Image (cartoon, rainbow, N blue to C red):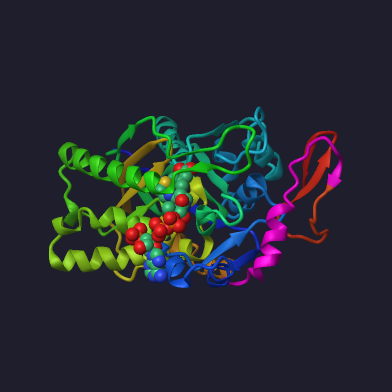
Amino acid sequence: MMTVGIDKIAFYTPNYVLDLVELAKDRNDEPDKYTIGIGQDKQTVVPNFEDVVTMGANAASQIVTHENRDTIDTIIFATESGIDNSKSGAIYIQKLLNLSEFVRTIEIKQACYAGTFGLMQARDYVTLHPDRSVLVIASDIARYGLSTPGEVTQGAGAVAMLVSSSPKILAFNNDSVYMSRDVADFWRPIDREEAIVDGHLSTTIYKEMFLSLWHRYKEQTNNELNSFAGFAFHLPYTKMGKKALDQIMDEANPKQQIKLADNLRASQIFSRDVGNLYTGSVYLSLLSLLSHAKNLKSGDKIAIFSYGSGAEAELYSVTLQDEFLTGIPAEKTRQLLSKRKKVSVSEYEHIFSSQRFNSHEDKKTDASENATTVQFLGWQNGERIYQ
Ligand code: HMG
């Protein structure tokens, strides 16, 4: 059977970062609650010249090359913090990346899950059209509000992936199991900038759906826990992955338990320093796993668990390809994170409150003129202007 999977992957996050130990002190919380209990050290802070389109374009521009740009037939943009109720973010990306007009562009939404649906659509399309490729972008800003319980789990960023046949990094194994259930754990009415969330319910539903899909997956495939070299979990906060995996850990032999725990830590490293990026989080966890795990080799199987509140989840596996290591932007991602400018709690609060959502006035953002990345310049006649 033809191999279809992820040929290229890249991550982008804005250039400002908040230390969560400083946030904990300011909020009269124990720093250990944030860094150990929840498992987050830092979070990206989003200036008013970044949004899901700029982040998505800045991730995708790293993987669209002279060689592959003409193979791209479709841009699938997955987000739950879109900038327009009508027009797809994918159209802006097409223009910003100078992609052909003869492409399909679409935006999809189901909380943090939509990126996975995008990948599955891309897989099906490329299976039918093996000489074409699909650009899947998962881009979001996780925003809960100042001094809310969710504040420590905020974050932002985009993961872009190119799906093609004969992929360099990993192949999809066509073994997905998935489920949907109407739950009021987290949602965001159209007139609100911040989500309404029952954090403890959401954690419970995440764990339940993982367990339920794990049993279904084992029933429908010949896999067991010892079949996998590691897991990539949706990581709204890094402890969430551990909570899910701990439920089934005793199914593994002792050596495998050590390996899975080591690789879980490897998968959490980037998210610890960025925070939740909703649709992109599970793929940042995958990127972190492939960037940091010491023991992975081609042919290894990785399980991927995608969860989106509301709620929908999917569990599937991928197989690492021969040259996967050379396709992983490990160093580039580390540099992106380490070069971010640190902001104090009061600077973060100011930036948080200065996002400009008013389309009724022409107004410029704080975008700088000499930027090398795509920025949101401001509003003009109700339109968002990018450069
Ligand atoms: P909270 O109520 O502030 O925290 O909310 P807590 O009291 O539950 O404490 C958290 C952990 O810290 C606990 O550990 C404490 O014991 C521990 P646990 O029992 O959970 O293992 N702790 C300490 N540890 C060490 N030293 C200390 C200390 N003190 C306490 N001194 C919560 C935490 C994550 C619920 C909150 O931040 C929140 O609501 N976040 C947003 C929702 C969320 O992330 N949900 C996750 C699942 S839903 C999902 O993944 C979907 C989502 O991404 C959205 C989408 O799909 O679009 C969110």
| Residue 291, position as x, y percentages in the image | 42, 65
On screen, residue 88 versus residue 180, left or right, reads right
Along the horizontal axis of the image, is 264 left or right of 130? left
Q: Is residue 118 above or below residue 52?
A: above
Looking at the picture, how far across and down is residue 7, in whole percent?
45, 50
The quarter of the image that holds ligand 1 is: bottom left
Region of the chain picked out in magenta, as a range: 338-363
The spot of residue 195 in percent (x, y) is 55, 42
Q: Quadrant of the N terminus?
A: top left
State whether residue 258 is above or below residue 304: below
Residue at the extreme top: 86
Total marks drawn? 0
Q: Residue at x 67, y 45 (%)?
A: 97
Q: Is residue 163 visible?
A: no
Residue at point 15%, 43% (across, down): 222
Membership of 353 in magenta stretch: yes
Q: Nearer the viewer, residue 338 or 242?
A: 242
Residue 294 lies in quadrant = bottom left
Q: Position of residue 88 (x, y in %)?
A: 63, 32
Instruction: Name which quarter of the figure residue 17 lies in.
Output: bottom right
Q: Is residue 301 magenta?
A: no
- Residue 357 at least partly seen: yes
Most foreground residue, 321 or 27: 27
